[in-house]
Image: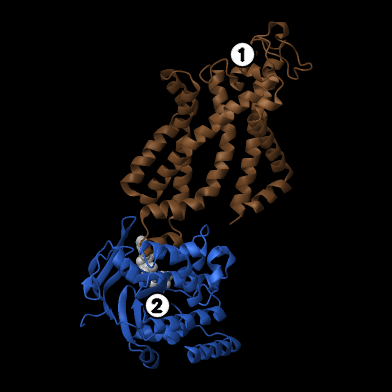
Chain colours: A brown, B blue
Amino acid sequence: MKRTFAILLRNPLSLLGLVIVAVVVLSAVFADFITPFPAHAGAVVDFANFNKAPEWPYVMGTDLVGRDLFTRIVYAYRISLILGVVVLVLAVPVGVAIGLLAGYLGGWTEYLLMRLTDVFLSIPPLVLAMSMMGVLEPTLTNGMIAVTAMWWPWYTRLVYNLTRAEKEEGYVLAAEIIGASRLHVMFREILPNCVPSIVTKMTLDLGFVILIASSLSFLGLGVQPPTPDLGSMVADGAKYLPDSWWLTVFPGLAILVAVFGFNLVGDALREVLGAEQ
Amino acid sequence: MSHPFLSLRDVSKTFHTGGREVRAVDGVSFDVDEGECLAIVGESGSGKSTVANMILGIYPQTLGEIAFKGSALPGRRDLVHRRAIQLVQQNPLSSLNPRRSIGASLRLALDVHEIGERSGRDERTGQLLEEVGLPAAFRTRSPAALSGGQRQRVAIARALACQSELVVLDEPTSALDVLVQARVLKLLNELREKRGLTYIFITHDLSVVRNVATRVAVFEKGRLVELSPTEAIFADPKHPYTRRLIGAVPVVTAGEAELRNRLMEKTDANA
Ligand SMILES: Nc1ncnc2c1ncn2[C@@H]1O[C@H](COP(=O)(O)OP(=O)(O)OP(=O)(O)O)[C@@H](O)[C@H]1O
Ligand SMILES: [Mg+2]
């Protein structure tokens, strides 16, 4: 773990990624303290300062009802990260467990579970999420459910393939000959060997979940006002381009930077953890 | 007890792969006596591992019966039989989980078979390590931090952890270099004597056979072609195939041969 971290710090790209991720996460966590107008995260109206180009103290300008854009972007990070973490916390255990069961048990279990996974994988993610959101009310909770529903099969695929390979290793046979239960073999022997790949994918996915959630809210299906959301900001601001450019440029950049940062760290982790064995 | 310790009666195994049938083991019968070390030799693909895997219950035999201490072994093994018959694999790197400590790998056998008090099991893993000539402190290490010989000692300790009676060793020293090989063989001889273990020892190496085996079973194309005491096999091989096998022992350089002989003598003296 320490070694992994040391290697990450040595590479300039992964260092940049770590810095971005740290800034995004820390600013989201401490949003109440670092933003100039924490109240602007909610339904505040300040018509005296509406639609202002960047100028002190509004470093990124204000929106159409006079709220500080910088404040709203930081709070949007908070929502996005919560969404990303919740989605992964729900999707990863489900996907991993199904992948382990299918890969290790084989037979009918494998056939049924993998066909189910393939069905979910064959539906384009946005279509799946949109159709779910069409049925469900567009709330944050339902957004999480929709994104979770499209996310778990990727972990099933990943862990399924890893499990099929690990199953052939001598340590699995050794545990079976000793008489260990199937649950032990799957979760205590095979799973630890999948963890590096899972962690890497989770890091990459935190960025992608933010992107998908933004796409959903861009389409009006995600987080609802007045909760700040990067995708909705871009969508709403787009009507006022190019005059009020800050309304779209800064939220857009915020999405880009966050996704970029998580990707850099994920890529670096993949190399470091893969090479560690 | 008039039952043989382990007996195979007309045991066959047919694999079906891609529409093809491979008869890997063909009507094999033999007994293994308690406390002996039966070597199984034969060229690659002669069915040695397949016999071992059926004894271990990795897969069932297609025909015939395998009996342990007088009772037929079921295709699906229960914990009692798992505990009695253990395996040491060829490759000690893959046979130990790289993500678990040596102690955790050893403790599994104690936990599964509920050997000793729960609280004393970690200490017991240390004793097991000492029994195979490793420091108890290796418990906390990962397999990657050990040499090939040390890893194989851990694998041996694991096979003994659940107080097994029969240990199947499938080419346990062929991944090790000659010096280490001799030391591991010496350890195996000592353990067999001390614990009254029975070995089924699969190998390609006839000098290993000479060193550890009490009897030798020779396999050819899935059939048992000769089964004799070790001295008899080398002094007077009956089957033409055995003769060829013994004649095919690779000639090593004079220096290597001398080194090996010296090591073997030492091993004999210490055993
Ligand atoms: N799981 C399997 N599926 C299909 N065929 C198999 C399987 N296991 C073994 N065989 C075939 O059975 C025959 C005997 O194989 P086995 O592994 O018992 O040989 P071996 O004597 O142990 O050889 P080696 O010395 O190379 O380990 C070979 O022809 C092999 O290809
Ligand atoms: Mg073999």
Instruction: Give, as a three-letter code, the residue at label 2.
Output: Phe
**x, y percentage for residue B153?**
50, 73
The amino acid type found where label 1 is placed reads: Asp
Host chain of mark 2 = B
Determine if marks 2 and 1 fall on one subunit: no
Labelled disc at residue B201: 2
- Mark 1, chain letter? A
Q: Is residue A225 visible?
A: yes
In the rendered image, residue A102, in percent from the top left (x then y), is placed at 38, 46
**Place of residue A31 in the rendered image (x, y in percent of width and height, measured from the top left):** 66, 27
Quadrant for the C terminus of chain A in the image: bottom right
Q: What element carries label 1?
A: helix
Mark 2 falls on what kind of element?
A: strand
Q: Distance between the residues labelled 2 and 1?
A: 75 Å
On screen, A169 above or below B190? Answer: above
Q: Which mark is residue A37?
A: none
B185 up-or-down from A34: above or below:
below
Q: Mark 1 points at which residue?
A: A236
Callout 1: CB less than 8 Å from ligand 1 = no
Given residues B186 and A73, the one toward you in this image is: A73
Q: Residue furthest right?
A: A56
Where residue A63 sits, quadrant-wise, is top right
Crowding at dot 1, Cα within 10 Å, few <14 / some 14-19 / many 20+, comes out as: some
Q: Residue at x 68, y 10 (%)?
A: A66
Residue sitting at x 39%, y 62%: B111
Q: Give the image quarter of residue A260.
A: top right
Image position of A198 (left or right of A69): left
Q: Where residue B147 appears, x then y in whole percent?
A: 57, 70
Which residue is painted at 50% across and 64% down in the image?
B103
